[in-house]
Amino acid sequence: MSGFFQLLRKKKELIPLVGIMAFAATGATSASLYFLLTKPDVILNKTTNPEPWERLDPSKPQKLITINQQWKPVEELELVKRITK
């Protein structure tokens, strides 16, 4: 670790590169954790909930930007749900 800091002291032009890479790694990690913990369609364990899309709330938008979203149930899917339950 001290060798890394000595390298940065010798070659100061690497400091912005290291800063940008650290910022990008932090952003990617935080975005991954955010989606993992807050989005209902992201799952880790498929054995407890093999079909996560069944539990989505249709009134809550799932996209980052939703324009004119109108949700209507599909009759064929509702029929299949009633038959299989």
Image (cartoon, helix red, strand yellow):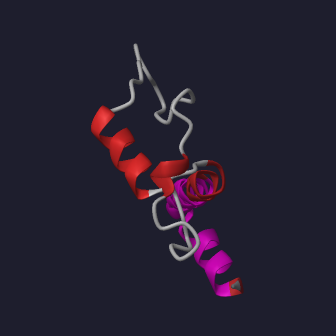
In the rendered image, residue 6, in percent from the top left (x then y), is placed at 65, 79
In this picture, is 57 found above or below 55?
above
Which residue is painted at 28% across and 39% down in the image?
Answer: 76
In this picture, is 77 found above or below 12?
above
Q: Which residues are magenta?
A: 3-30
Rendered-image quadrant of the N terminus: bottom right
In the rendered image, residue 48, in percent from the top left (x then y), is placed at 59, 72
Judge by depth and name the residue closer to the eye, 19 or 32: 32
Query: Is 26 placed left or right of 53 in the picture?
Result: right
Judge by depth and name the residue closer to the eye, 21 or 42: 42
Which residue is painted at 57% across and 52% down in the image?
Answer: 35
In the rendered image, residue 14, in percent from the top left (x then y), is placed at 51, 63
In the rendered image, residue 71, in percent from the top left (x then y), is placed at 42, 24
25 magenta-colored: yes
Query: Is 19 placed left or right of 53 in the picture?
Result: right
Outermost residue toward the right in this view: 2
Which residue is painted at 41% across and 57% down in the image?
Answer: 84
